[in-house]
Image (cartoon, rainbow, N blue to C red):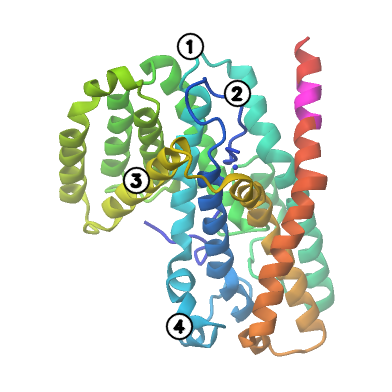
Amino acid sequence: MRQPLSRNPTADRPHGVNSHAAASRPASGHAATLANLDFLRGIAAVAVLLWHYQHFYYLSAGSPPPPEFRSGQPFFDGLRPLYLNGWMAVEFFWTISGFVLFHVYGRKPSVDARQYFWARFSRLYPLHLITLLLVALLQAVSLTRLGHFQIYSHNDLYHFGLQLFFASDWGFQKGFSFNAPIWSVSVEVISYLVFLVYCRASSYRLLPALAIVLACHVATRWSAHPAIACMQFFFAGCSAGIVFHAPDDRKFRLAFLAPAMLILGAALAYLSDKGPGQLFQLLLFSGLVLGAAQLDRRQFSTGRWGIRVGQITYASYLIHIPVQITALLILDSLQVSRTIANQPLFFVGFLCGTLLLSILVFRFIEMPLKNWVLMHAGRARS
C-alpha cells in the first residue's frame, strides 16, 4: 500500500464520538460518547504531524528530502516510530470512522439518506473549503514572491477543481496538490456511500462487512487505488462496531467469530504479496478500536479530556499544511536555512502552535459552520 503524502494525512476521520463522521446519539445501552476513541484519534493526529514534519526539509515542491535528513529531526531516537511510520495513522483513522459510523447508525432501523448526506457534508466540507482557499492563497504568494510553490507542486486550476469536489485522489490527479492531506477524506467519501448501501442491503450483518474486507484485500492485488485500501480498513472498523453492539443475550451467536476471523486472517495472509504486514494492521487497528470502546463501556474512560483531544483532530489534520507553508514562506523570504527545523525549539513551536490553533479553529470556525449548515439544511427540508 502506498504511504501517505510522501507520495503524501494522516487524517477522523474519524471525534464524543468525533470521526470524520458527524454523530447523532446511538441507542441506549451502549456508551454514547466513546472518549477513548477520541483520545486515540488525537494520538493518531500527532503521528500525522510528526510524519509530515519532513516537509520542512523538502528540497523543492514535490521533492522529498534525502533519507539522511531523518536522523537530524528533533528527538529522533525517542520519536523514531512516529517519524518513520506516522503515515499509518491514516489507516487507523479509516478504521475508527467505520466503527463510529456503525456506532451512530448501526442500531437504527433505517438510515435517512438525506440526513446522512448533510451530517457528512456539514462535518467535512466547510473546513475543507476554507483551508483549500487559504492554501491556494499562500501558494500564490509563494509563487509570486519566491518563484516557486511550497511542499506540493500541482497547484493549478485542474487540481483545484478536483479538490473542490472532494475528488483529489480518485485517480484523476497528476500528483499531490494544495491541502493534500484531504486525499484520505476524498477516498473515504466512497466508503461512506458504500456504507449507506450496506446499511440498507445487509441489515447490519457481520458476514457482509467481513466479505467487503476480504474482497477489498483481494482487489489490492490488482489495484493500488487508495479507495480500496480505505474501504478495507473502514469495514474492518465497521465489523468491530457490529461486535461491540451485539446484544448481551445474543453474544453466543457470535461464537463463530473467532474461527471466522482466523479463516479471514489466513486468507488475507495467503493472498497478500506483502506478507503479514497489512493483516497485522487490520487486526491491530480493529482490535484497538474495539478494546478502547469496551473500556469506555466498563467506565475506564479518558472522559472529557479524551473528548477534547479528539475534537481537534480534523482541524489539526487540515491546518497543519497551511501552518507549514506559512513557516516556509517566512524562512525562505528571510533566507533562513531549513535546517532550523533540527532545533527542538522550532519543533515544539510547530507542534504546540498547530494544536493550539486547532483548538481555536474547532471552536470558532469548524463547529459554528457545521451547525450553520445543518440548520439551513433542516430549513430546506421543512
* Secondary structure mostly seen in the magenta stretch: helix
User: Which element type, helix, strand or loop, lies under badge 1?
Assistant: loop
Indicate which disc, 3 or 1, sits on the residue closer to the N terminus.
1
Residue 373 highlighted magenta (yes or no)? yes
Q: Nearer the viewer, mark 2 or mark 1?
A: 1
Q: What residue type is labelled 1?
A: Pro
Residue identifier under label 2: 116
Residue at x 65% of width, y 28% of height: 119
Q: Which amino acid does label 4 sit on?
A: Asp
Tag 3: Cα neighbours inside 10 Å, few (<14), some, or many (≥20)? some
Residue identifier under label 1: 109
Residue 343 highlighted magenta (yes or no)? no
Residue 204 in picture, x, y percent from top left: 39, 20
Front-lying residue, 36 or 147:
36
Q: Which of marks 2 and 3 is in front?
A: 3
Indicate which disc, 4 or 2, sits on the residue closer to the N terminus.
4
Residue 332 in picture, x, y percent from top left: 76, 83
Tell me whether the residue at label 1 lies in contact with that at label 4, contact meaning CB atoms closer than 8 angstroms: no
Residue identifier under label 4: 77
| Furthest residue toward front | 299
Residue identifier under label 3: 287
User: Which element type, helix, strand or loop, lies under badge 3?
Assistant: helix
Q: What residue type is labelled 2?
A: Tyr
Residue at x 79% of width, y 53% of height: 360
**In which quadrant of the rendered view does residue 381 lie?**
top right
Extent of the magenta region? 372-377
Q: Mark 3 to mark 4: distance in Å?
A: 28 Å
